[in-house]
């Protein structure tokens, strides 16, 4: 079967063929985050702020893998995540983006049905588990919280100076399969909102094949602003079939018996 993607022929509705969990899973991601009514997110006063320790990365690869662009620091990176709903310390692995063809679509998670133009995912793995000692092992471990992904919505507004080094690099990885070593240092902390206090959290999965149900999701309420030009730069990245990636987001999945917790009222 042709490798998975986001077109009619190989998109989310076809993924079940190679990944049955796409249709049979009961904790699939993304989801629509509903804030009022029956199945709405429930305020949990025990949820603490998320704590990130992201020293500026000095060595990293920026890659267009045909279905997203991904920033991956070298193995030595010491960036860590803890706090929030987590009981363990997680190691940073990579970040990547999901976006759409216009400003009314592109994010994977939705809030009361509303999509944002893009979503940033910061991927981490549990570095204190006795069952695995690498990211790849964590993904294959079946541990319900092997990974923790921080999701940030992107909305169109002022230019984001902290993300400019990334969006300026997109033209250098226009072709699928291309990568560049990131020039200089990148300060990821500067991209994020100051306080990581207001978020939704729930148990879910990878949003791309293998769709493993091993992710503790933390999706922040406060969007990150980027300019129209920065959004357009994402839309010029190719998918490996000579076409731009114009929508690498999976539609929302059923909640089943899951509940979503909110750290804010
Ligand atoms: C296996 C590599 C990988 C992805 F390809 C991916 F799309 C995501 S996602 N969208 O759920 O954040 C991950 F977390 C992840 F670890
Ligand atoms: Zn993602």
Image: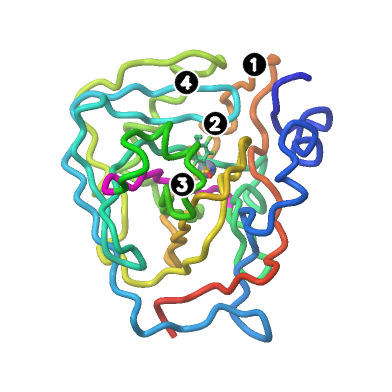
Rounded to the nearest angstrom, the CA distance separating label 2 from label 1 is: 11 Å
Say the numbered circle drawn on residue 240: 1
Tell whether label 4 touches label 2 (CB within 8 Å): no
Residue at the disc numbered 3: 120
Q: Which residue is at a point 67% across and 86% down the rendered structure image?
A: 37
Quarter residue 207 falls in: top right
Q: Which residue is at a point 27% across and 66% down the rendered structure image?
A: 195
**Structural crowding at the residue carrying mark 1, measured as other residues with C-alpha within 10 Å and reported as few (<14), some (14–19) or many (≥20):** some
Rounded to the nearest angstrom, the CA distance separating label 2 from label 4 is: 13 Å
Q: Secondary structure at mark 4?
A: helix
**Structural crowding at the residue carrying mark 3, measured as other residues with C-alpha within 10 Å and reported as few (<14), some (14–19) or many (≥20):** many
Of marks 3 and 4, the one in the foreground: 3
**Structural crowding at the residue carrying mark 2, measured as other residues with C-alpha within 10 Å and reported as few (<14), some (14–19) or many (≥20):** many
Q: Is residue 181 above or below residue 38?
A: above
Rounded to the nearest angstrom, the CA distance separating label 1 from label 4 is: 14 Å
Q: Position of residue 44 (x, y in %)?
A: 42, 82
Q: Position of residue 196 (x, y in %)?
A: 31, 65
- Residue numbers of the magenta segment: 117-128
Say the numbered circle drawn on residue 171: 4
Residue at the disc numbered 2: 68
In primary-sequence order, the first of circles 1 and 4 is: 4
In primary-sequence order, the first of circles 3 and 4 is: 3
In primary-sequence order, the first of circles 3 and 1 is: 3
Rounded to the nearest angstrom, the CA distance separating label 2 from label 3 is: 11 Å
Whether ligand 1 has any atom under 8 Å from the Cβ at mark 2 is answered as yes
Q: Does the magenta run of residues contain 126? A: yes
Of marks 2 and 4, the one in the foreground: 2
């Amino acid at each position: 079967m042709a490798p998975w993607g986001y077109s009619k022929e190989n998109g989310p509705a076809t993924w079940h063929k190679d990944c049955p969990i796409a249709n049979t899973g009961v904790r699939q991601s993304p989801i629509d985050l509903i804030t009022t009514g029956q199945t709405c997110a429930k305020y949990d006063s025990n949820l603490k702020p998320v704590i990130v320790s992201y020293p500026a990365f000095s060595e990293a690869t920026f890659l267009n893998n045909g279905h997203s662009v991904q920033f991956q620091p070298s193995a030595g990176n010491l960036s860590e995540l803890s706090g929030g709903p987590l009981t363990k310390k997680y190691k940073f692995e990579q970040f990547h983006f999901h976006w759409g063809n216009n400003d009314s679509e592109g994010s994977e998670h939705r809030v009361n049905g509303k999509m944002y133009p893009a979503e940033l995912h910061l991927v981490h793995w549990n570095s204190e588990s006795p069952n695995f000692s690498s990211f790849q092992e964590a993904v294959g471990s079946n541990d319900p919280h092997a990974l923790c992904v921080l999701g940030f919505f992107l909305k169109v507004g002022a230019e984001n100076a902290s993300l400019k080094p990334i969006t300026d690099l997109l033209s250098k990885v226009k072709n699928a399969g291309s990568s560049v070593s990131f020039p200089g240092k990148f300060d990821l902390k500067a991209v994020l909102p100051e306080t990581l206090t207001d978020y939704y959290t729930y148990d879910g999965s990878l949003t791309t094949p293998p769709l493993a149900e091993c992710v503790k999701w933390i999706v922040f309420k406060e969007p990150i602003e980027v300019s129209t030009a920065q959004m357009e730069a994402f839309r010029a990245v190719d998918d490996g079939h000579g076409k731009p990636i114009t929508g690498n987001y999976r539609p929302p999945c059923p909640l089943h018996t899951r509940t979503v917790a909110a750290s804010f009222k």
